[in-house]
Amino acid sequence: MNLDNVTAVREMDPDNMLDRIAELPQQCRDAWLAAQELDVPGDHGDIEQVVVLGMGGSAIGGALLKGLVEDDCTVPISVVRGYELPAFVEGADTLVVASSYSGNTEETLSSFRKALERGAKATAITTGGKLGDLAAEHDLPIVTFEYDAQPRAALGFSFTLLLGLFTHLGLVRDFSDDVEEAAAVMEAWQEEIALAVPTEENEAKQLARSLAGRLPVVYGAGFLTAAANRWKTQFNENAKHWAFFEQLPELNHNAVVGFGLPEVVRENAVVLMLRSNHDYPRVQVRWDVTEELLEREGVDVETVEGRGESALAQMLSVIHFGDYVSYYLTMLNGVDPTPVETIAFLKRRLANGGR
């Protein structure tokens, strides 16, 4: 695939995933504006902890929020991806936020029902579905939005609405200026990596070419750990491509020992380091030494740094750049970015008891 052949690329993207990626900055603005009108009782902020329930693209919003605000938030935040609910969720001192784009995610519905049984304060972020019905049945406050796309393409809503909810409840500071900066930074970077920009001038296309036929392993630290996870899942879902992610400094205590073997992985892996000047000073040193270790073993390394001043701008700009990289890798793989047939197959089998 010639990534500079706009017509050919568009033909492989009949559902316009590229347009959804380009809309992320405006999504964040729209979601933040909508969050200012949230109708959630103030006593929902009178809690000792928050648990965000979600899977896939919806869960990422919770993970991003946790990484961004946990050093300043007045209560601890947990993200639950699964059917069960931690035993510590018991009574009204916990706020449980269920996030499901469709409203029909079975794991989220299961854990949300348990939260209601245990008397937790609860709300939901969704476009509707069974989750919306369940919230209405229990007369719960609900944060709804409309956006016709795959759940992973609605990150601007699932994350920013959650951030707005935390602000509304007084759990974090006002992020209005940061949201606007992030949107502006994303739009500026987008001009450099858009489809119309030729490969020789386009960093996202160049990076995608370096990943074609190879194994991306994405490294993140601190508030960019969830961004690394986002890169991994975008490679999986958009490009239908193997990928993994790791967290610094934890990987310095195990993964570094395995850089050399097996040779077939070492020779075909590409480590993508998502770095920020907001990273803890000792983590900055670890980045440099880890890169040196990788290069010593002959493993290719690429570094991507967030843009902007605020942590939010750097986090979202790194994510937005990664979305473009995943899209161009999709084109190089010769696949349609939107469908996720294997997930649909899995859901059909689950609906039939695994048969």
Image: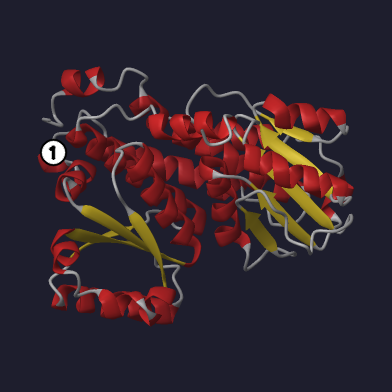
- The percent coordinates of residue 197 (x first, y second) are 19, 33
- The percent coordinates of residue 266 (x first, y second) are 17, 66
Query: Residue at point 32% right, 38% down?
Result: 190
Which one is in front, 179 or 273?
Answer: 273
Q: Is residue 205 above or below residue 45?
A: above
Query: Residue at point 21% right, 32% down?
Result: 331
- The percent coordinates of residue 16 (x first, y second) are 35, 21
Which one is in front, 214 or 123?
Answer: 214
Amino acid at pointer 1:
Thr
Q: Which residue matches tag 1?
A: 199
- The percent coordinates of residue 110 (x first, y second) are 71, 43
Q: Is residue 267 above or below residue 163?
A: below
Image quarter hosting the N terminus: top left
Across the whole image, how many numbered discs are drawn on residues?
Answer: 1
Q: Is residue 303 shown to the viewer in this render? A: yes
Horizontal arrangement in the rendering, residue 339 relative to residue 168 (left or right): left
Query: Residue at point 19% right, 63% down?
Result: 265
Q: Is residue 68 above or below residue 186?
A: below
Indicate the secondary structure of the residue bearing disc 1: helix
Horizontal arrangement in the rendering, residue 300 relative to residue 244 (left or right): left
Q: Is residue 310 shown to the viewer in this render? A: no
Q: Image quadrant of residue 37?
A: top right
Query: Residue at point 76% right, 50% down?
Result: 96
Q: Is residue 49 above or below residue 95?
A: below
